[in-house]
Amino acid sequence: MALSTREGANAPRINLYSDTQTLPTPAMRRAMAEAPVGDEQSFADPSVNALCERVAVLLGHEAAVFLPSGTMCNEISIRVHCRPGDEVIAEASCHILNFEGGGPAALSGVQIAPIPGERGIYTAEQAEAAIRPEHRYAPRSALLEVENTANMGGGTVWPLEAVQAVTDVARKHGLATHLDGARLPNAVVASGTAAADYGACFDSAWIDLSKGLGCPVGAVLAGSSAFIDEAWRWKQRMGGAMRQAGILAAAGLHALDRHWDRLAEDHANAALLADALAQIDGVSVEPCETNILFFDVGGTGRSAPDIAERAGAAGLRIGAMGPTRMRAVTHLDVDRADCEEAARILAEAAA
């Protein structure tokens, strides 16, 4: 069990709670310790500069900025693209609406127009219907947002054609577009679509380093040079400016070189776990496309929090996402044997 040897005796043997639970590998720690550094705010940190340049090219944009978190990427983008009173169009289960503490309202004075999609994906027709006609009584539709993969949809991958269709609608109506790419690397590996092809559809796009890529912290936001200049202003205002951040950026560079392609292993492990859980009486497994697996335990007669607690006592940490819905997320600290053992523990917990 890879995780137990790296987290210590008091940690769960298997951690499927989230891919944010990954720990930096020994090789990543060495890269961080040896990183050339400088003053990031003066653009004098060579590691930060190299990371930003690389991600800008990766996502098909002119420039990029290194930020402490993906949430800050989203909130800065909303603040740059919108003004108070505007409205952001997004799928109803999206991160910006449900998991950022009301940030769009608190920080930008905007509201979210939620579209009830299918497993986190909405259609061009739904996007068209959500855009408000220009009228002084109504909020102005200013930004269209896509989350790829769609976390609460089950790690669902947006097909490139679907992305192009909704962003074409946005451009036709003069809206800006933003990609929440927290798990875009998973979408790229699963679909075979280039990150730049996804990124080119949007005015702003970002990838998280601290999820499947296994870094301890950080995300990189990309866009036009003018957009990134303004994003820097808000990075400063929001307290996201750093100093010798190359120690963190070096982890990102290491991950882009060594952890991107191996995301396919996480997808295979999630599929294995899905097949095993489907054999448990009373468990209903949702479709699994990447490294996120949702399943319902209502048919077992037990609640999700009860099963999560019982599993925790047996050494497995897993998420209860509602009364009967549960989530398991595979990552580089979980191998095939861990997933087999997790299925056994969950079967016992559900019995």
Image (cartoon, rainbow, N blue to C red):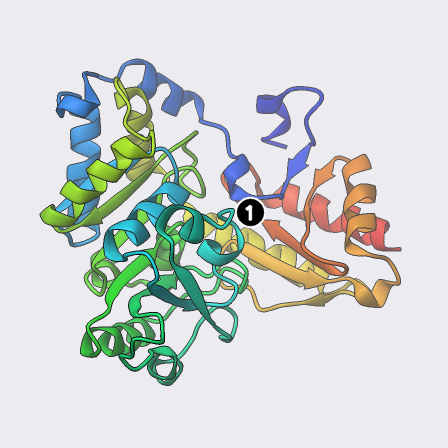
> Would you say 104 lies left or right of 60 here?
right
Q: Is residue 246 above or below residue 231?
A: above
Residue 170 figure quarter? bottom left
Q: Quadrant of the N terminus?
A: top right
Using a 10 Å C-alpha cutoff, classify the residue at mark 1 as few (fewer than 14 neighbours), some (14 to 19) or many (20 or more): many
According to the picture, the residue beneath numbered tag 1 turns out to be: 330
Q: Is residue 252 in view?
A: yes
Residue 47 figure quarter? top left
> Would you say 302 lies left or right of 35 here?
right
User: What's the residue at 42%, 59% (across, down)?
Assistant: 149
| In the foreground, 122 or 159 | 122
Q: Is residue 260 in view?
A: no
User: What's the residue at 30%, 20% (across, down)?
Assistant: 247
Residue 174 figure quarter? bottom left
Q: Amino acid under label 1?
A: Thr
Q: Is residue 210 above or below residue 142?
A: above
User: What's the residue at 20%, 57% (across, down)?
Assistant: 196
| Image position, residue 98 (x, y; %) | 53, 55
The image shows a total of numbered marks equal to 1
> Would you say 76 lies left or right of 171 here?
right
| Image position, residue 83 (x, y; %) | 28, 56
Q: Quadrant of the C terminus?
A: bottom right
Q: Is residue 167 above or below residue 81?
A: below
Say which element carries label 1.
loop
| Image position, residue 214 (x, y; %) | 43, 36
| In the foreground, 156 or 137 | 137
